[in-house]
Image (tube, grey):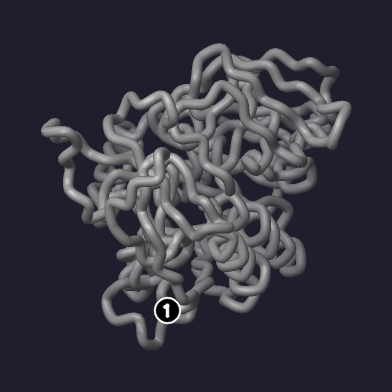
């Protein structure tokens, strides 16, 4: 696929593109496709977390080596840049602030807006590049403004949920070479190209920080206050280690067993009672308190830059790994903000996470669940 300029102008193959290389197979194949299509492309590895004492939790040396190997294989320039201070100031401090409030933030979304499509895009412009590229499984409209963010063709890999906070400038200066591909095809292309990372497992950790045991990692920065684990009726079942370490819908790590009235079934978190520092749990994954038909968000970022007419009929996701569910989005006359009313109750609606809106294949935007 060729990528025309947003205004429908000259062919982008006369433009300079800098590709964010993570060391993984997706960005590697993105580099391959851009090279094959004749673009003037170079690769860059972003170091965004200082890890002098991290042991083996964040093997960035392996990532850098894999990223450089791709550039060497394709004979394209390779660079590194350090955005660690930007990441700390613009992403991680917010993550810690939200965690202190007992909420469950999604740092990947803020990381994309502030670092991958923020600090990186600014850097690319400073060194003379016209566009940036990434290995995200998304697409965007071409040749028209405002630019629209479209879901990836591989619905199982679609990453539009993580990119809903991008603005028009960020989106229109970004290209997504693998947005039309499925994951199997990406791996096939990588293997055929001789990339050693063609079968590398995808990352599921915190953006730029890596895959870690969450509680020990967060404990390095925040001190948890122990408190009671209770049923909705007030029966104390055990103790928690700090509300920040848990999330709505969680069943593991509670250490309270599974017995209730002779029936064994797992317990699930349904509420964090911050004033009392209490974790409220129910038994069984179909308990009514696990489900809500309505949620509230104070602000919504609309990718087009302007709000639609309300009430808005759309579909929405409240987490990445789920299908979008039909809903109405209403602008509140009293108290401000927006109410989202789902046709079907949603499981484990979690404050601090994002609700992201869609109309067919178009990602409209989203907001933080309050």
Q: Position of residue 257 (x, y in %)?
A: 17, 48
Q: Neighbour class for label 1 at 10 Å: few (<14), some, many (≥20)? A: few
Which residue is at a point 45% across and 23% down the rendered structure image?
323
Number of numbered labels in the structure image: 1
What quarter of the picture does the C terminus occupy?
A: top right
Residue 160: x percent and y percent?
A: 56, 35
Say which of 22 and 128 sits in front. 22
Q: Is residue 353 left or right of residue 367?
A: left
Circle 1 sits on which residue?
Answer: 220
**Residue nearest the observer in this picture, 55 or 190:** 55
Is disc 1 placed on a helix, strand or loop? loop
Q: Nearer the viewer, residue 79 or 352?
A: 352
Residue at 66% x, 45% y: name it. 174
From this viewpoint, which residue is outermost toward the bottom? 52
Q: Is residue 321 above or below residue 191?
A: above
Which quarter of the image is occupied by the N terminus?
Answer: top right
Judged left or right of residue 363, residue 30 is left
- Residue sitting at 61 percent across and 25 percent down? 294
Seen in the picture, residue 58 relative to 356 is either above or below; the reply is below
Q: Say if residue 75 shows up in the picture.
A: no
* Residue 59 lies in quadrant: bottom left
Residue 130 x/y as whole percent: 73, 53
Depth order, front residue of 322/195: 322
Residue 303, placed above or below residue 126: above
Residue 102 visible in the snapshot: yes
- Residue 142: image location, x then y, percent: 71, 29
Residue 227 higher or lower than 314, as above or below: below
Residue appearing at x 63%, y 64% in the figure: 94
Quarter holding residue 118? bottom right
């Amino acid at each position: 696929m060729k990528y025309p300029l947003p205004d429908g102008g000259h062919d982008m193959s006369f433009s300079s593109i800098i590709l964010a290389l993570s060391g993984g197979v997706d960005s590697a194949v993105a580099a391959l496709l851009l090279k094959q299509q004749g673009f003037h492309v170079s690769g860059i590895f972003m170091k965004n977390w200082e890890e002098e004492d991290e042991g083996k939790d964040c093997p960035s040396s392996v990532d850098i080596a894999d990223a450089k190997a791709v550039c060497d294989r394709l004979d394209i320039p390779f660079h590194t840049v350090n955005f660690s201070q930007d990441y700390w100031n613009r992403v991680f401090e917010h993550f810690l602030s939200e965690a202190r409030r007992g909420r469950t933030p999604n740092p990947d979304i803020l990381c994309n807006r502030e670092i991958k499509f923020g600090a990186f895009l600014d850097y690319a412009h400073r060194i003379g590049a016209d566009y940036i590229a990434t290995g995200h499984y998304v697409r965007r409209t071409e040749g028209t403004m405002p630019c629209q963010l479209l879901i990836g063709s591989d619905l199982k890999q679609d990453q539009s949920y993580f990119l809903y906070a991008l603005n028009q400038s960020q989106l229109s200066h970004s290209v997504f070479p693998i947005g039309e591909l499925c994951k199997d095809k990406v791996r096939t292309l990588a293997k055929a190209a001789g990339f050693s990372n063609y079968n590398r497992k995808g990352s599921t950790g915190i953006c730029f920080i890596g895959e870690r045991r969450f509680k020990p990692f967060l404990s390095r920065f925040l001190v948890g206050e122990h408190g009671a684990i209770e049923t909705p009726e007030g029966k104390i079942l055990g103790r928690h280690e700090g509300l920040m370490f848990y999330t709505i819908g969680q069943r593991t790590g509670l250490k309270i067993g599974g017995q209730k009235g002779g029936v064994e079934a797992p317990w699930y978190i349904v509420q964090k009672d911050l004033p009392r520092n209490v974790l409220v749990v129910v038994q069984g994954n179909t308990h009514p308190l696990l489900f809500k038909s309505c949620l509230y968000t104070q602000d919504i970022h609309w990718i087009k830059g302007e709000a639609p007419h309300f009430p808005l009929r759309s579909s929405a996701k409240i987490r990445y790994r789920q299908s979008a569910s039909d809903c109405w989005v209403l602008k509140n006359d009293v108290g401000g903000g927006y109410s989202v009313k789902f046709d079907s109750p949603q499981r484990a609606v979690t404050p601090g996470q994002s609700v992201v809106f869609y109309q067919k294949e178009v990602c409209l935007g989203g907001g933080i669940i309050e």
